[in-house]
Image (cartoon, rainbow, N blue to C red):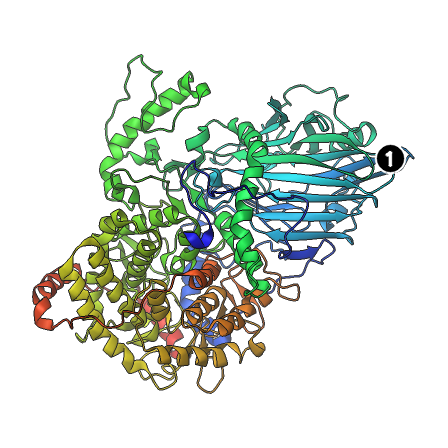
Amino acid sequence: MSETGVDGGEGEPALHGDKVKVDPGTPPSLTWKRKLTAEESALSSFSLSIKEIISMAPIGYRLWRHLRVEKNKSTSSDVFVDPFTKRHTSSCHGVPIGGIGAGSIGRSCKGEFMRWQLFPRICEDVPVLANQFSVFVSRPNGEKFSSVLCPKSPEILSDSSASGIGSWDWNLGGQNSTYHALYPRAWTVYDGEPDPALKIVCRQLSPVIPNNYKESSYPVAVFTFTLSNLGKTEADVTLLFSWANSVGGDSGLSGHHFNSKFRTENTSGVLLHHMTANGKPSVAFAIAAEETDVVHVSQCPGFVISGNSKGITARDMWHEIKERGSFDHLNSEEMSLPSEPGSLIGAAIAASLTIPPQTVQTVTFSLSWACPEINFQGGRTYLRRYTKFYGTQSNVASQIAHDAIVDHHQWESEIEAWQRPILEDKSLPEWYPSTLFNELYYLNAGGTIWTDGSPPLHGLRTIGKRRFSLDRSNSIFTTAAATPTPTPSDQNDTAINILDRMTSLLNEIHTPVSMSSALGTNLLQKGEENVGQFLYLEGIEYHMCNTYDVHFYASFALTMLFPKIELSIQRDFAAAVMMHDPSKMNLLQDGTSVQRKVLGAVPHDIGMRDPWFEVNFYSLHNTDRWKDLNPKFVLQVYRDFVATGDEEFARAVWPSVYIAMAYMEQFDKDGDGMIENEGFPDQTYDTWSVSGVSAYCGGLWVAALQASSALAGVVGDKGSEDYFWFRFEKAKKVYEKLWNGEYFDYDDSGSSTSSSIQADQLAGQWYARACGLSPIVDEDKARKALEKVYNFNVLKVKNGRMGAANGMLPSGEPDLCSMQSREIWSGITYAVAAGMIHENMVETAFKTAVGVSEVAWSEEGHGYSFQTPEGWDFEGRYRSLAYMRPLAIWAMQWALTQKKVPKNEERKTQIKEESVVRQHIGFSRVAHLLRQSDEADSRSVFQVIFDYTCKKMVG
């Protein structure tokens, strides 16, 4: 799209025109900044009120009981959340490393490598402290300086081992050192530390480049050090990059890991082969540095960090560099010995150079990893996107590391060309550009998985009792067409070719199953590019992939930056609409048993245990009866058509759109054309009950009717175009009854909270505007309602410095009817601000959204940078760190850059009911076939009594 300044597809440059020159040693003027002396602050999580504890006791008990039963299982839990396990938290997160969907390694603003996410659902938050950059400086007058380029942590202080990393020189004070973040880049400026006459700038870069579907998938980061010798004498400098053979946690202690040297053109490094335990796939890391006429690179293939493995110790390795400046004199083999169980080993590379006085030199390192397979609990295995370009061998990590060093200048040029226009836009408040870009961290660190688009690699345990025979011919050196293009090393590998043959056979066995899954690749039209399939978690604490009611808000980031990925997600959900899975699942809400997914319902999520094949991992409520999911699907589909102009996509998903709309007909109880909520939390606010016609779901429904009409026009279905427009006009009149003169009531049930002022009351209006459709309410009413939200939900909470409270009462007090009504949700605040921009309330929009930046990103805030929570209470205490919805800040950018469309509020001809009778009959027949039957109550007598008692206690 033009507003991102990008174009291109797989393997093409993401940007065109002159190359933008970038100085890696100079951070942009607008970045998120922290001094390295910034103190770690304890994060405060929210707490429940007594009333909320009682009302949610049945859910909590069922969840606790289920987790207790599964505690001793070796596999992951079948529950989407575990609120009883305490996580390691930090207030010092920075820009994570790696591309998109190939695994993520976090990095703190102080330089620690932390929050490891290389396998589905596994997040190891604690830093691996041996992973460090260090510097050694020697001058002719005998002055010497050495330090790890990271302040000493309490964990290092407690290290009593004389031979471990505690023996290194942790001399960095950090007083003169500053961290700058602008995702996907970060800079750490060491201004005279540890050598007062040497300025060091480390620029970290990952290849996250809009509209680039190749390099953006690479598991790699590049670190360029700019060294400025401000002294009067030359300086002999060695930069050390050390790395533990670990994937986080205690994984490095499982034993049998080993390292090996490698050399490619102009780069040298070490491969660390991690033989992952507990059934997880193996991983290979590569650390590398560029050799030039000025820079000499030497390798240490192994040192012992802890335990009894054979080899030099961490202390010995450090001493070697400190005394000799390189590993050239180290008597080491090309490959280290495998580590002993209980022992942790590492490797290191050293880049040495001499810098004349008053000159500047650069040194470039890279870190990559190869973890080609994604294994899910259900037994299916997928290949990551990057394997399409590098193959599936683990040793390709060295080639990726080499290519990153060669190509990173072009990557940075493209990133700079994308970001610079926004950074230089003086109409934007200073906090906005850096927050806009830094919220994109979640595309990497949100448990993201990006496959190569091939069918899953099935294991024997997924076959059941079916008979089969593997082809026994001798032509084993043929490559199956369904597998990625083989590398030269693959072509003569017997194991690879036998695996290809097994894959081909298993794919044939499972083809009928795949056709009844949510694999959207089946909807690709001839000639359309398969860019792979994409998963990201609702939150690192909420384990569900592509949670759709939340993606509704977050999706603007993908639509603007990676639209082909966004279309891939929508195809998956279009396929899921057509799925019917009658297998039973137990609900945490009331203990009843329901069908997992019925035909016509948009699933809550694409799954976790067995994504695409077993949807709806969420088990709190029966989301087949939620009122927001189907309208959100229709609105997103149309928005994505508007963004891409892809008519093939529109035609492919149109049947699913029609069925999704017909499915909703059963929720129009009185036949007035408007759906009604059913008295439980049947929408994204899943602890906040709603009944009857509601501002939130009702507005989404009205907007979806209009979007359905518009999409029908795109695909050439004139009858449906007129029919859905007729339905839109009818429902719009019902919706207007919620208007009370100042805003739209929460619902029309007449309850004590029906008049609650919901921040998100105009979600339907916002999306209609975002799609370029006609407004669903009068413009003056929309502006008046949003002004009410600003004056009450925003300004009455800490003077507008916290974001928008979800619910406020007309009295000006918070709506305390539920946990979520009294919370402030970061993503919702961004969405409300986006809606304000569409209504030309730009100044008010930024005043609304700045509260999220103040709480999450400011130095005076609560330490939520690079882990923006779902929400917080009025004191800033968080719930659910690192959440998907805050990506909705890109909805603000969409609103700011969207081309203004001509007003089309009135149709040229009024659609009369008699002209759409035939379409109504057909639609009604489809709707009748999709109508759900009421499920029998499957709870025990004890469950019924317990639930009833808790409900009565809270009134």
Q: Which residue is mark 1?
A: 139
284 or 817, which is in the foreground? 284
Q: Position of residue 743 (x, y in %)?
A: 38, 81
Q: Position of residue 363 (x, y in %)?
A: 69, 35
Q: Amino acid at mark 1?
A: Arg
The quarter of the picture where residue 591 lies is: bottom left
906 or 565, which is in the foreground? 906
Q: Secondary structure at mark 1?
A: loop
- Badge count: 1
For label 1, count other residues whose C-alpha is less than 10 Å away and answer few (under 14), some (14-19) or many (20+): some
Horizontal side of 216 relative to 766 (left or right) equals: right
The residue most toward the right is 141
The quarter of the picture where residue 730 lies is: bottom left
727 or 932, which is in the foreground? 727
The quarter of the picture where residue 474 lies is: top left
Horizontal side of 207 relative to 603 (left or right) equals: right
Residue placed at 51% from the left, 73% from the top?
843
Q: Position of residue 789 (x, y in %)?
A: 45, 78
